[in-house]
Image (cartoon, rainbow, N blue to C red):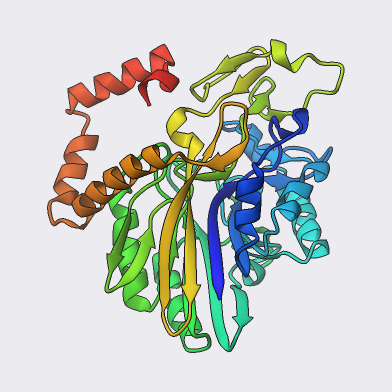
């Protein structure tokens, strides 16, 4: 059984305003696998009201319309994780609509639901005499993910990343299925190095019996390490997550055909507030994603390669030369993460007293020159 895991997928944004969104090479590559799994990081719905809590807070509403969903189907995704901080951006009605569309298209899902029982269920794969449980969770309660609607006994929402419950789930499903793969949506955005909390939780997951961890959320690729021979991919970053138009105060916006989208100004840093329509353009580092190829036999073996979203928002493979440099960078960072010195170095790097780094980040944001610096 050959499975491919992809990063975050948002099938709308600027894509409806262009003819192509993926090269034939990547599209044919995806067909080589028995199963395709990704994270659907968007609510799906047309003319559905925005979630009130989200609008009263940071107002970063991420959604795609019903007519944009065909791209998920066209890419032949078999399973999607809904455990993320944007799947509830159109409220419960949007989540219901998203789930209905997935069911109509025979796409399995996990990580969110109309109650906790549904949200916590794994997506199960049974092929060639092997069974795999895919468990998905979303981190919550910190500023890096913002507001996350958690599922309850009779309340729709996402499956919370509570490490004690995760450990219990892994042990439970490991007795039922041959393999357990965990897909956590966690960490801090735009970082190459995972949070210490994410590293600690990943080790606990492997200790509990997880066979692989495939993380997301940071919109930046992060290193892969091995622990007890099991792979931990901290973040695959974006797969198909294009630039997008925003309308004041900040929700994603889909202008009608009478609007000249080329006239909309661009922002290369995520703005705190906008007064006029704006195109949010990903920085270079967030245009690189990782896909994980998983071979399932008597054991699980994985390897990865890079994809890249071009400036004109077409998904393609990353160039060979750039891929080699990225691999070297991730290899060295992986060594750092596994070292005993990582907690001290990470805390020092993020300290408020680290003036050179904090000053660099301040200038980086203010000048909005991401495409030059990345």
How many numbered marks have been drawn onto this rendered protein structure?
0
Q: Position of residue 357 (x, y in %)?
A: 23, 26
In this orientation, does residue 91 appear?
A: yes
Q: Position of residue 191 (x, y in %)?
A: 36, 39
- Which quadrant is the N terminus positioned in? bottom right
* Image position of 110 with respect to 241: above or below: below
In the picture shown, does residue 174 fall above or below 86? Answer: below
Residue for point 22% across, 29% down: 352
Residue situated furthest right in the rendering = 258
Q: Is residue 132 above or below residue 329?
A: below
Residue 342 screen position, x and y as percent? 18, 50
Quarter of image, res 79: bottom right
Q: Nearer the viewer, residue 275 or 288?
A: 288
Q: Can see residue 41?
A: no
Horizontally, residue 308 falls left or right of residue 21, namely left
Identify which residue is drawn at 78% across, 42% down: 68
């Amino acid at each position: 059984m050959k499975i491919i895991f992809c990063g975050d997928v948002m099938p709308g944004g600027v894509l409806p305003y262009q003819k192509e969104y993926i090269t034939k090479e990547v599209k044919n590559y995806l067909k080589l696998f028995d199963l395709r799994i990704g994270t659907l990081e968007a609510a799906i719905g047309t003319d559905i009201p925005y979630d009130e809590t989200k609008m009263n807070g940071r107002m970063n509403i991420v959604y795609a319309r019903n007519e944009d969903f065909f791209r998920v189907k066209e890419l032949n995704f078999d399973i999607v994780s809904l455990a993320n901080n944007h799947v509830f951006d159109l409220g419960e009605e949007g989540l219901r609509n998203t789930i209905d569309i997935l069911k109509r298209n025979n796409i399995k899902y996990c990580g969110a639901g109309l109650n906790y029982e549904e949200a916590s269920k794994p997506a199960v794969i049974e092929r060639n005499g092997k069974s795999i449980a895919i468990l998905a969770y979303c981190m919550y309660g910190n500023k890096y993910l913002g507001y996350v609607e958690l599922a309850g006994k009779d309340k729709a929402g996402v499956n919370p990343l509570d490490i004690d419950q995760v450990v219990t789930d892994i042990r439970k499903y490991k007795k039922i299925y041959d393999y357990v793969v965990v897909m956590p949506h966690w960490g801090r955005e735009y970082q190459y190095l995972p949070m210490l909390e994410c590293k600690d939780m990943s080790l606990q997951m492997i200790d509990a019996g997880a066979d692989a961890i495939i993380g997301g959320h940071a919109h930046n690729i992060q290193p892969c390490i091995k622990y007890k021979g099991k792979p931990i991919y901290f973040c695959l970053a974006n797969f198909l997550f294009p630039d997008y138009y925003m309308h004041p105060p900040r929700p994603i916006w889909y202008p009608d055909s009478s609007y000249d989208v080329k006239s909309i100004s661009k922002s290369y840093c995520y703005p705190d507030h906008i007064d006029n329509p704006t195109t949010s353009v990903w920085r270079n580092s967030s245009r690189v994603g990782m896909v994980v190829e998983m071979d399932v036999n008597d054991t699980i073996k994985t390897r990865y390669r890079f994809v890249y979203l071009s400036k004109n928002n077409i998904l393609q493979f990353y160039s060979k030369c750039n891929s080699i440099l990225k691999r070297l960078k991730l290899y060295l960072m992986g060594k750092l993460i596994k070292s005993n010195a990582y907690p001290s170095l990470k805390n020092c790097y993020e300290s408020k007293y680290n003036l050179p780094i904090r000053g660099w980040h301040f200038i980086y944001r203010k000048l909005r020159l991401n495409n030059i610096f990345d």
